[in-house]
């Protein structure tokens, strides 16, 4: 009887609970990979928009303003270097989470635990490729990490859209206000 009890799982296959647990692990892995793919799309799309705008502006003043061209080329170089680093990082995470369900479990069931947050916003605004008038109210440090990371992505996507659809790099106004239990991005 004991031998049959040990062989039953092999002969009968996984239990419904085992199948459900395996499906949940696969779903968690897919959620992690989808989040990373979105993050990659947002960051690379923004960087390419900024580089395109900077290169176009530099080309227009190539002969008349060599100092501006130098600054634009430096910004392009920094943006592409940083984007390649981000790409390497995200692809590394994708490789690790594609391997096993345990990696997806360890990655937090699809919850974003990495990436820049509101604390990195000043750097993003400085290198985004478009002039930004920025005002902030409240304590950005009081915003929970996951919300701060999503807010960063929202601002990043908005700046990408401004670069893509806003003409020739006209000014962008951004206001972020933190109140009790509320974050407003305008």
Image (cartoon, grey):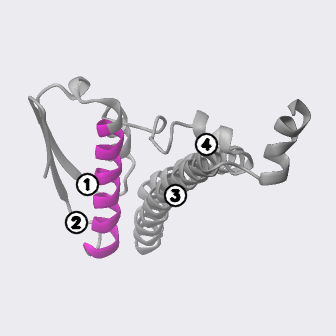
Q: Which residue is mark 2?
A: 170
Horizontal and vertical percent for residue 79?
A: 52, 51
> Which marked residue is nearer to the observer: mark 2 or mark 3?
3
Query: How would you rate the neighbour count of disc 4 (Cα within 10 Å): few for under 14, some for 14-19, many for 20 or more?
Result: many
Horizontal and vertical percent for residue 144?
A: 28, 29
Q: Which mark is residue 104?
A: 4
Pick whichever, 180 or 106, lies toward us. Answer: 106
Residue at the outermost right position: 3
Horizontal arrangement in the rendering, residue 30 relative to residue 142 (left or right): right
Under circle 1, the secondary element is loop
Q: How many marks?
A: 4
Residue at the outermost front position: 1
> What whole-number distance in Å separates the C-alpha atoms at marks 4 and 1?
39 Å
Pick whichever, 59 or 137, lies toward us. Answer: 137
Give the magenta-colored segment's residue range.
147-166
Q: Which residue is mark 1?
A: 131
Q: Residue at x 22, y 51 (%)?
A: 132
């Amino acid at each position: 009887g004991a031998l049959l009890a040990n062989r039953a799982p092999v002969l009968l296959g996984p239990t419904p609970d085992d199948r459900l647990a395996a499906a949940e692990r696969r779903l968690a892995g897919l959620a992690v990979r989808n989040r990373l793919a979105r993050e990659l799309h947002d960051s690379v799309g923004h960087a390419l928009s900024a580089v395109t705008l900077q290169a176009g502006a530099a080309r227009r003043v190539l002969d008349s303003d060599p100092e501006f061209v130098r600054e634009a080329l430096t910004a392009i170089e920094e943006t592409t270097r940083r984007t390649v680093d981000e790409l390497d990082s995200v692809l590394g995470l994708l490789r690790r989470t594609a391997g096993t369900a345990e990696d997806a479990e360890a990655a937090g069931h699809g919850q974003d635990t990495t990436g820049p947050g509101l604390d990195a916003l000043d750097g993003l605004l400085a290198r985004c490729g478009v002039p930004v008038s920025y005002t902030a109210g409240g304590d950005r440090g009081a915003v929970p990490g996951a919300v701060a990371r999503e807010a960063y992505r929202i601002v990043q996507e908005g700046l990408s859209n401004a670069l893509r659809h806003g003409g020739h790099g006209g000014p962008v106004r951004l206001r972020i206000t933190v109140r009790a239990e509320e974050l407003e991005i305008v």
